[in-house]
Each structure stands twice: as structure tokens, then as C-alpha cells.
Image: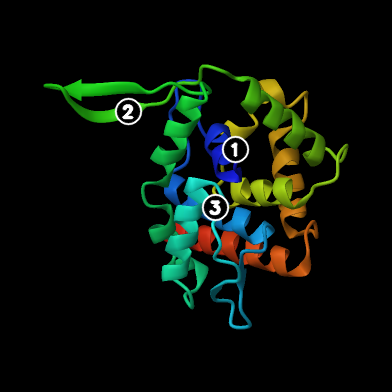
Amino acid sequence: MLIAEEYLLLTMNDKGVSHVSSRELGVAGALLSELATAEKVMLDDRDRLSVLESAPTGDEVLDEALLRIEAKTGKKPKDALAAIGKGMPKLLLERLSANEVVQEDRHEVLGVRIWSGWPLVDPAPRDDLRAELLRVLTGVQEPDARTGALISLLQATSAWGTAMPKDVRSGVKANEIRASAKKISKGRWGSEAVKKAIDEITAAITVVVTTR
């Protein structure tokens, strides 16, 4: 499962309603982070996007994201996020539906789809994610590049209320979760280049979200 799919699952409630106002930006950041951890995309010495390896990844969503990033080569992450994330949540939700994790709930008028909800039908993948994140956030497990990126994205989009609700925190307070997430986001859990890229990506998301 991609980091972007994990992000989507963690930021939706059981009825498939997103609790972040910047879902496309979060997904764009997750896709960029995935490609950064795979060392396909990095930042140059001016902190601008650079594609290091353009060969297909074998994942159609990541490959589409890579094409969009190539078109934004030389741009700062904040200036590329909107283009990278446009329409991506729907593609990923359709894939999660095909894998029977969520189910599309179509709302139509005169046979024309107006919008779709994506209620959860298999909670196991999300529950496993929450359990892993709780272990990392409480210091039981060390963060790696993947969990570090995901925590940074959830932090940047203020998504902890949905990602780690009270009934799954095992008595850990919400402010303790946020404080731990902030510390982990600033920590070192990947190579210097990967960490730099993800830091810039999440900082760009924070700037865009707070200035909307």
C-alpha cells in the first residue's frame, strides 16, 4: 500500500468522510514522499524539484505522479503540489475499493453521479496502521522513512483527531500524540537527502494550508 493510500485511510472516518480540508495536498505530499524515499525524486541545491530516475515504478499512480513532477522540474514543492495532487485521491480510493478496503457509495441525480462517498468495509488495514503509528509515537518502535513521512504528513495537515481518535490511543492523551509527532517530524529517520526532501514537502503543505 502506498503512503498516499495510508494517508487517505487515516484521514477518513468509517463513513468515508475526509476530515482534512486539504486532501489533494496531503496526497500530493505523500506521493512526493514515496518517490523521495525511493530516491527517484529529490531537491536540488536550490530546494527545487529534480527527477533523478524517470523509469516507471510499476505502480500506475506513482508513475502518473512522476510524470507530473517531471513537468514541474525546477519548481519549489509548494508550487507543484496542486498539480501533482489533482484528482489523485479519487484514483487511490478507486484502487482501495477494488481491493475491498472501501466501497464506493454513489450519489446520483437523474442517473448522473454528483459525488461519491467511500465508506470503510475492511477496517483491518487502517487498524494495523494505527497500531504501528501508536508504537512509534510512544517510543516502542523506531520510525523509519515510511512511518516518519506519514507522521510528518499527518502533522502538516493537522489530522491527528481522525488518525488517532481517543478509542485507539490506549490512554495516551491527544496532546502527547501531537507533541511526539512534532518531535518525530523534526528527527532523523531517513538519509539526509530523503529527510531534507520530506521536510521541504511537509513545510510547503503547512504553508499552503495555513494561508488558505
Position of the N terminus, as image quadrant, is top right
Please state which amino acid type lies under the numbered disc 2: Ser
- Mark linked to residue 60: none
Label total for image: 3
For residue 75, above or below residue 103: below
Mark 2 or mark 3: whose residue is earlier in sequence: 3
Residue at the location (69% across, 30% down)?
A: 130
Can you tell which quarter of the image residue 178 is in?
Answer: top right
Mark 1 or mark 2: whose residue is earlier in sequence: 1
For residue 19, above or below residue 125: below
- Which type of secondary structure does the marked residue at label 3 adopt? helix
- Give the residue number, with chain letter if any, for mark 3: 31
| Residue that sits furthest to the right in the current view | 140
Q: Nearer the viewer, residue 19 or 67?
A: 67
For residue 37, above or below residue 110: below
Please state which amino acid type lies under the numbered disc 3: Leu
- Which type of secondary structure does the marked residue at label 1 adopt? helix
- Give the residue number, with chain letter if any, for mark 2: 116
Q: Is residue 72 visible?
A: yes
Residue at the location (47% across, 35% down)?
A: 19
Q: Position of residue 184 (x, y in %)?
A: 76, 52
The residues tagged by marks 3 and 1 sit, at their Cα atoms, a distance apart of 11 Å
Q: Is residue 26 visible?
A: no
- Give the residue number, with chain letter if any, for mark 1: 6
